[in-house]
């Protein structure tokens, strides 16, 4: 059927944190490698294994509701970043050029992560967590919101993170189609244009919403940092605009990045992420613009969680920047991540793959660029496949698959939930560096000691408000 992207007026993207496709959706079709209609589906059969540190074969297994802390698996934060990802894929931190990944290092690398936490007396890891727990996978029964959306709209089983590393570089790719060579989270800001600036150049509206504080993404790029404050808000602002039918062409949603939040970062509460997905869906489905909306739910990276599919080494190098580690050339994608495409213009039960090329985060950029005739950002999004072909229905569907679905409740809490998360600390550091003059016109500012998530949240709100006031004065 004909591509219906031209009928889409609103693209909304929710990007969660650090989960692999297999961990969240691998058992979507209960061990079968095809849908009931016969479409291929690259999920889990149940026969997949990884060796532990003694060589013992550890099979994948299902998380069940009666397990202790079922919504906090794998029970500790797995290894992230470029070198940990290499260990998980190649079983060595420095694979030789042209080496083929085997995806056989996840269990051993997870043991290293557990040992590191214990040695440093971190309280994030749950008592009793074992290296084999990285092979525990969620089932549709445990994730009723996500699985219902996947079964009733479109699931992408070949969506790879843009780079084989951690959060900030992949979020940069999601907005700018490059990380400018960066491969870890310690980035003050990027200096390239983003999709948000490209849209502004074309006088096309956009918005970024944090969950309960100003969005971290605002601090990523010059064109977002200096944009008018009307482009930014929090989740309740998103809900109001969705209800009124006034969302812009592109909306980017952040979760609550705190340890007590809904980002689903290991080992935070996965049930809260289910609740967030349902909130986002209901805001859009119950709003007046539903028939013209494409909702995209993705994750920034795999977060060290097991996936059996080897990432392709066919990625287009985005620019001339060499990676900061091992002269990485960005031709290898990251590990598969869960991805859902949701719209009344998508047929139920779709497993969506690109007819040519490999889907990664920059495919969202390509879709926006294609829909609104926006210039590409780098060679990566120029080469990326669009998602438009998933939209095949000229007459929007009227059913509501989540009408009677309730999001789960975990009945537990993260053990170190008051402590600031890595992204919260990064956000605070970034806003501390904003060039805001004090009452005496001086730009010197020292970030105060911030010991809790609550203190960091207040500091981020205050500094962002001061930045907005400074920008208003500059603009006269």
Image: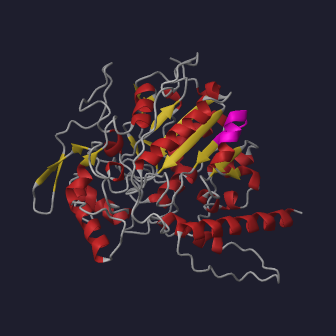
Q: Would you say residue 248 sits in the magenta stretch?
A: yes
Above or below residue 274? Residue 268 is below
Q: Which residues are magenta?
A: 239-250
Q: Is residue 71 visible?
A: yes
Q: Is residue 20 magenta?
A: no
Q: Position of residue 315 (x, y in %)?
A: 41, 49
Placement of 276 over or under 185, stated as above or below? above
In the image, 323: left or right of 29?
A: right
Q: Position of residue 408 (x, y in %)?
A: 42, 40
Q: Residue at x 37, y 47 (%)?
A: 314
Is residue 248 in view? no
Figure quadrant of residue 250: top right
In this view of the protein, which residue sits in the foreground, 284 or 331? 284
Horizontal side of residue 134 vs 281, given as left or right: left
Tell me the residue at 70%/39% (across/down): 241
What count of labels does the image hold? Answer: 0
Quarter of the image for the C terminus: give it. bottom right
- Residue 342 placed where, x, y %? 51, 31
Q: Residue furthest front?
A: 411
Say above or below: 277 vs 411: above
Residues 155 and 455: in front is 455
Q: Position of residue 139 (x, y in %)?
A: 31, 38
Left or right: 218 with respect to 419?
right
């Amino acid at each position: 059927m004909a591509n219906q992207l031209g009928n889409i007026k609103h693209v909304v993207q929710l990007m969660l944190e650090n989960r692999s496709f297999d961990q969240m959706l691998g058992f979507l079709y209960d061990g079968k490698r095809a849908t009931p209609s016969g479409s291929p589906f690259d999920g889990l059969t149940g026969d997949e294994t990884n060796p532990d540190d003694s060589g013992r074969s550890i099979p994948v297994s299902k998380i069940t509701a009666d397990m202790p802390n079922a919504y906090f698996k794998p029970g500790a934060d797995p290894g992230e970043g470029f070198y940990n990802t290499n260990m998980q894929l190649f079983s060595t931190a420095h694979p030789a050029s042209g080496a083929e990944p085997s995806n056989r290092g996840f269990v051993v690398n997870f043991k290293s992560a557990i040992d590191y936490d214990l040695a440093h007396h971190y309280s994030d890891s749950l008592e009793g967590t074992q290296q084999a727990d990285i092979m525990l996978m969620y089932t549709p029964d445990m994730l009723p919101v996500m699985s219902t959306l996947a079964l009733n709209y479109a699931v992408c089983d070949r969506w790879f993170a843009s780079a084989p590393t951690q959060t900030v570089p992949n979020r940069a790719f999601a907005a700018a189609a490059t990380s400018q060579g960066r491969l870890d989270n310690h980035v003050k800001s990027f200096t390239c244009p983003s999709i948000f600036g490209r849209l502004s150049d074309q006088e096309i509206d956009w918005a970024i919403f944090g969950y309960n504080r100003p969005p971290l993404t605002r601090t990523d790029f010059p064109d977002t940092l200096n944009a008018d404050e009307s482009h930014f808000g929090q989740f309740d602002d998103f809900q109001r605009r969705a209800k009124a039918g006034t969302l812009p062409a592109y909306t980017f949603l952040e979760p609550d990045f705190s340890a007590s939040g809904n980002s689903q970062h290991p080992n935070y509460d996965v049930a809260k992420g289910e609740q967030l997905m349902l909130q986002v869906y209901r805001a859009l489905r119950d709003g007046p613009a539903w028939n013209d909306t494409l909702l995209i739910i993705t994750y920034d990276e795999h977060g060290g969680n097991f996936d059996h599919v080897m990432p392709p080494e066919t990625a287009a190098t985005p620019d001339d920047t060499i990676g900061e580690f091992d002269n990485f050339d960005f031709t290898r994608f990251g590990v598969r991540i869960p991805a859902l495409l949701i719209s009344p213009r998508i047929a139920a039960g779709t497993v969506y793959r690109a007819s040519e090329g490999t889907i990664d985060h920059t495919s969202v950029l390509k879709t926006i660029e294609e829909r609104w005739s926006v210039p590409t950002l780098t060679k990566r999004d120029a080469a990326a496949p669009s998602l438009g072909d998933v939209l095949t229905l000229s007459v929007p569907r009227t059913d509501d698959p989540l009408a009677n679905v309730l999001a789960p409740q975990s009945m537990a809490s993260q053990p170190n939930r008051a402590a600031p998360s890595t992204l919260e600390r990064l956000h605070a550091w970034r806003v501390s560096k904003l060039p805001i003059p004090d009452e005496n016109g001086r730009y010197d500012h020292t970030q105060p000691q911030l010991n809790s998530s609550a203190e960091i949240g207040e500091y981020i709100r205050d500094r962002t408000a001061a930045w907005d006031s400074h920008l208003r004065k500059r603009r006269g």
